Image (spheres, helix red, strand yellow):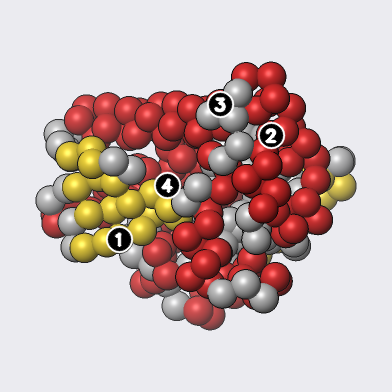
């Protein structure tokens, strides 16, 4: 989505399966190769109807790119971006004394390092403009899986899925600022971060009543307002 300026920030296999009526397993299998196919094979895919309806401009860009550079150009670009992200993640982890194994599109790490590895991957992925989830295959193996869930409500919170339940407060605010920094006033964000960090380490430790009372100031097109920090 990011490489070809797709209008939806997130997608999930489940969302597409529900919208199209296609079996979830088939959607997952098709997504393994859909964007890597030649154009005519893409048109024959059961996913083509969904993308032609919901992402016509993105498909047009993919078509033009494949026509000019060959159909393999899409997979080459995806792989290049994945390698750039993983390289940056590994360099950072090594700089703080954490060493991992890079296996295909996954990282293997020690149990004690898993929280830091997840947070680092999520942060750097967001910095590259890619919306993804970090999937925990085992207690020490994490796979970057493309998240393709459509969020239609504009500005929304980031850390509200199962994969981020043990996210630290520091990482939550870092990710929040990456995504919404241009809309949020720094003073209100820093105040919440300072107060919450005094009493808690992880997001899931904060009582719901406290979360419900956390608002940050926004400034969108010169208009000031408020937004919930947690949803």
Q: Which residue is mark 4?
A: 122
Give the x, y percent position of residue 204. 39, 71
Q: CA distance from mark 1 to mark 3?
A: 30 Å
Q: Position of residue 158 (x, y in %)?
A: 55, 57
Q: Which numbered disc flags the more N-terminal residue, 1 or 2? A: 2
| Label 4 element class | helix
Name which residue lies at 82% across and 50% down.
224
The N terminus: image quadrant: top right
Residue under pointer 1: 136
Question: Are discs 4 and 1 less than 8 Å apart at CB?
Answer: no
Q: Earlier in the sequence, mark 3 or mark 4?
A: 3
Is 47 positioned to the left or the right of 162 in the image? right
Give me the residue at 33% from left, 52% from top.
143
SS at circle 3:
helix
Q: How far apart are the alpha carbons under marks 3 and 4?
A: 26 Å
Q: How many residues crowd mark 1 within 10 Å: few (<14), some (14–19), many (20+)?
A: some
107 left or right of 203 in image: left
Q: Is residue 186 visible from the viewing direction of this image?
A: no
Q: CA distance from mark 4 to mark 1?
A: 13 Å
- Determine the residue positioned at 72% across, 33% down: 63
Nearest to N terminus: mark 1 or mark 3: 3
Of circles 1 and 3, the one toward us is 3
User: Can the viewer see residue 162?
Assistant: yes
Residue 214 in which image quadrant: bottom right
Quadrant housing the C terminus: bottom right
């Amino acid at each position: 989505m990011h490489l070809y300026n797709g209008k939806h920030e997130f997608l999930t296999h489940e969302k597409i399966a529900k919208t199209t009526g296609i079996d979830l397993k088939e959607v997952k299998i098709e997504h393994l190769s859909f964007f890597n196919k030649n154009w005519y094979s893409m048109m024959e895919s059961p996913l083509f109807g969904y993308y032609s309806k919901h992402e016509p401009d993105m498909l047009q860009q993919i078509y033009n790119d494949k026509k000019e550079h060959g159909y393999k150009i899409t997979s080459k670009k995806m792989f290049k971006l994945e390698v750039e992200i993983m390289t940056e993640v590994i360099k950072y982890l090594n700089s703080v004394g954490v060493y991992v194994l890079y296996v295909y599109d996954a990282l293997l790490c020690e149990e004690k390092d898993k929280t830091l590895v997840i947070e680092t991957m999520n942060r750097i992925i967001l910095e590259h403009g890619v919306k993804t989830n970090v999937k925990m295959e085992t207690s020490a193996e994490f796979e970057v899986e493309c998240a393709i869930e459509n969020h239609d409500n504009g500005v929304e919170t980031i850390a509200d899925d199962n994969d981020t339940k043990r996210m630290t407060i520091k990482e939550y605010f870092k990710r929040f600022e990456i995504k919404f920094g241009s809309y949020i006033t720094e003073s209100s964000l820093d105040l919440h971060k300072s107060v919450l960090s005094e009493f808690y380490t992880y997001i899931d430790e904060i009582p719901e009543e406290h979360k419900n009372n956390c608002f940050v100031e926004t400034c969108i097109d010169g208009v000031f307002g408020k937004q919930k920090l947690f949803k």
